[in-house]
Image (spheres, grey):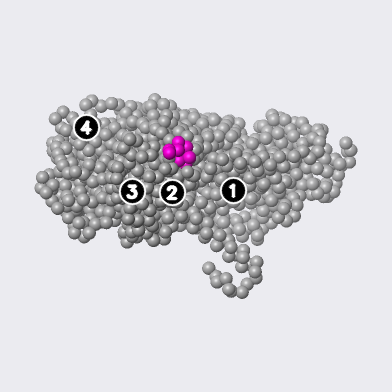
Amino acid sequence: MTGGWQSALAPGGSSADAILRLFWPTVALLGLIWLAVLLVLAAALLRRARPEAPRRAGAVVGAATAGTVLVVIGLTLASYLVTRPISAAADAPLIVQLRGLQWWWQATYPEEGEASGFVTANELHLPLGRPVRLELSAEDVIHSFWVPNLAGKQDMIPGRDNALTFTPTVPGVYRAQCAEFCGLQHARMALLVVVEPPEEFARWRAVQAAPATAEALAAEGRQVFERQPCGACHTVRGTGAAGRTGPDLTHLASRGTLAAGLLPMTRGALAAWIADPQTLKPGNNMPLVPLSADELQALTAWLASLR
Amino acid sequence: MTHDRRDTGLGDLALEAALRRVWAAAHGLWGLLATVDHKAIGRRYIATAFGFLILGGLLALAMRWQLSHPEARLLDPDRYNQVFTMHGSNMMFLFAVPVMEAMGVYFVPLMVGTRNIAFPRLNAFSYWVYLAGGLLLWGAFLLEMGPDVGWFAYVPLSGPQYSAGKRADIWAQMITFTEISALAVAVGLVVTVFKQRAPGMTLDRMPLFVWAMLVTAFVVILAMPAVVTASTALILDRLVGTHFFNPAEGGDVLLWQHLFWFFGHPEVYIIFIPAVGMVSTIIATFCRRPVFGYLAMVLALVGIGLLAFGLWVHHMFTTGLPRLGESFFTASSMAIAVPSGLQIFCWLATLWGARPRLAVPMLYVLAFLFTFVLGGMTGVMVASVPLDTQLHDSYFVVAHFHYVLIGGAVFPLLGAIHYWFPKLTGRMMGARPGRWECLLVFAGFNLTFFPMHILGLWGMPRRVYTYQPELPWAGLNLFASLSAVLLAAGFLLFFWNAWRSARHGAPAGENPWGAPTLEWATASPPPPWNFTRIPVVGSASPLWDSMGELTVAEGLRTDRRELLVTSVMDATPEARESSPQDSIWPLLAAIATSVMLVWSIFTPWAVVWGSIPIAVTLIGWFWPRGTPEDES
Amino acid sequence: MRKPSRPRPAAGVSVRQAVPLGLVLLALCGCRREAREVRLDPPVAAALAGVAAMPNGIGGRPPEVYFVLGKPYRGNAYQLSEGKRLYAWFGCPECHRDGEGSGRGPSLLDGWWNHGPGIETIYLSIRDGRPGGMPPYRTRLTHEQLWQLAGYVQVLGAYSASAAAPGRSDQVQSRPAENRAPARFAPLEP
């Protein structure tokens, strides 16, 4: 009943955990009040009518109202107390810049110590147990970053800088989704968040920062990629393709999903996506580029090798 | 001034004949278009609003069908976005607010014991403008250019760069239409309540429904200008190239959200407060005693009306505003639970000391209590900043606001339609189908919307046209979609019942329920002049306390439309005031206004050239006709 | 639709058929300007390449399919806004700025067309490039995109604003928005 990898009820991070610890007592308290109201209602309907002395009824109504005031004050304080740790700044957090675009996510891991910076898309990797500070921005319209298992949502608003700080506490793969209506493909704007031990994270980071591997660069698909318009929008580091309006594809095949969470990353899905993006995700900004069967074969084989 | 034209000493039959001569609308089409009778217009308003409810409900069914299984292809994303935008805009702007105001238009003059609403021509104008706004929106949708930016139309998505074509302009201009009509009605209601109450109906003898409509009217007057400002700024950005919402030129994206929710949250109370009045009215009648704690109820209504303006920011908890400010809005949002709770307790106290008769309106009130209190509880949850960061823009919120809007407003409205049906049509609404319909609507509603709480907690965001099979949402979505059929069946039964009862229902007398308020002191449906003689009120429940014989005031003229103006506080008679004749000018003015507003979607010059016909119609409307305003 | 030849009272025919017919006509007008065609069938998209160009690349005739589609790249708001997006994405502002031009590329706003104002000529200019520095874009854009961009560029330099033209961008402004007909505001060049 906890709802899995995109659920506020299965926390894997500090914020989501704190919120859930406020959530259940609140539900219990309010549920009890609701039941009490219904019980009084049922009793009022079932009992024999005896005109009450108005003064007594007045006292009861007054007491109930005073009780409401107390509950409201209590919940306000509780919510304030939970807000404080959630929004507190963390020591030496991992900083990741996440940018929302119609309809995908661009993640920038800045240079940190010896680790060099890089740009990737639609997948975040976070080290277990280390606070992370996501710096959120938007390219075009308002988006909202929501990974329910880890933290509450935070909007990405053009012209404003927002941030979200939390500490992942349970390793796993979580799914995030855009929570603010952002146009035609709002439903298809998802992101995977992989929480992994720090060593694995460091390995991943080193691989992502490197350009595409040498054997990949020798492949035939690379020529297709460079001959066709792909490079006008996409970057593959190490090739001539340096477009910036589409997702960075340097390590495309290392990601779990394709097209912002639309399809699992397989060669078949890649082929389907390239062959007809507007049927799979109507209205997205990837054009249907006509390719011959051989070109499509070579291209998908090459893209699938970009690990 | 001759005294033989007054009603003093005239026999009932002679008086009615005289009143019919001056108050009845002309026969035929002309009479339909020119009437300024608040009952004709109110009925029209209610019927139109329910028509829009049916259309919006069909859209909801289409959405439920689309979401009933993952990767469904009934609606493509473009169509789905139009459908959910239409559903929200239609239900809020074309159904909920107008229908509540329409109930006020019909019943407030009757309940305060006057012969017509104040500014009846403005009232007629408001209906025509409202109708034009609805036709604009639905016409656009049928032409595949329905708005697709959500009923909240957040910039920059609805702005000039990201919303091609005229879709967002049509949404923004529809707002202007409905706001003009809502403001016009609100002004009429306020003046009717303040200046036209029957003699003796002091403020503390006013029925709670009238209090509710008064508070609603004030909330409308204070809240609506914010959204008119916002939508006008949006149109200017889109059409003229201004920079209200362009951050690069010093505009602000969040300005839209502040303006929209400064209206948008009071909007919820514009819908809910009249429902409170309806519930109070129904409970009093079927418990055969006044609602417990009249003063507390009135203060709670006023308190809700005031607090409504202090909590718009709880729609923006995830936009990154300063935390301290957010905590203030948590407190104010939760504080509204206090007056709402007080009302619930007063109703419970009323029921506790009585033996309520469980007629259909009362069943709807029970459904309301069950559902609305639950929606109120989830409302307290979304008022808390940390909880809201998880719940906001998820299906939990969809569940929450349907609980408070359908449970809190539509259930009382359906009950009120059952309750006042005799006064609207002269016939009783079928009780047997009524019980079934109430059961179906209640069960269907809860089965449809309760699972959405869980879907939201499981991470399902709002406004998605589909979802993937690897997410665990399919089962509950299918369940909700099937339950929606039950809900739709309940509504179908309601409409069938109303349709049949209006033709073949048992004829109702003046006061079939034994109710205490003045609308039941005249025929069902009331004659065009409402009351043959203006009643005089000596208590808050005049029909219970007068033992069958209501004292009446005399001295009004019978050779023209005339009503009594009384003082604001104590309702002591101050003057006799003429009430306007039927006129075609409100319709013509509404047409001219509509032409200007629709035209201005395409060019800003329409505001200049389009105002000429408006000026002409207004001059016609107010052309002096040499009727001296005489005073008593 | 009933056949009009079917005998019935004259008034009935006109009213009952005029209303749906009028609605259909209106719907067609609405569709043309507001429809959002996001996916062309590949053969249709391929046919868009078939411009019959004059030998000097100035003037010609758009392919038949352009007319069959209803000239969407000139009058459809969605296609024009796509063109506007491509204009920014594919580096046009590098030389043409927001349309006002620079030392490296001519102005597109002044209503002065070096190679003629026809949409097919603008299409050819973008596709094949022009002497004097305009590079060819045929390897970077699909034919549909080329048409979208050409339509947008034509609207950019129009003297009278079309109702389908895009509004201003969410950026610093250097000229009136496209739907204000910038060419009318631009100084006329000799």
Mark 2 and 1 residues: CB-CB less than 8 Å, in contact?
no
Instruction: Give the residue drawn at x 14%, y 37%.
Output: A206
Q: Quadrant of residue C61?
A: bottom left
Q: Are marks 4 and 1 on the same chain?
A: no
What x and y, as percent, mark residue C77? 43, 48
Secondary structure of the residue carrying numbered label 3: helix
Residue picked out by circle 2: C77
Mark 4 vs mark 1, CA separation in Å: 55 Å
Mark 4 and 1 residues: CB-CB less than 8 Å, in contact?
no
> B215 left or right of A117?
right
Mark 4 vs mark 3, CA separation in Å: 41 Å
Farthest front residue? C190
Which circle marks residue B132 in the picture?
Answer: 1
Instruction: Give the residue drawn at x 29%, y 50%.
Output: C128
Instruction: Give the residue drawn at x 11%, y 49%.
Output: A218
Type of amino acid under label 3: Ser
> A299 left or right of C12?
left
Is residue A296 a member of the stretch shown in magenta? no
Mark 3 and 1 residues: CB-CB less than 8 Å, in contact?
no
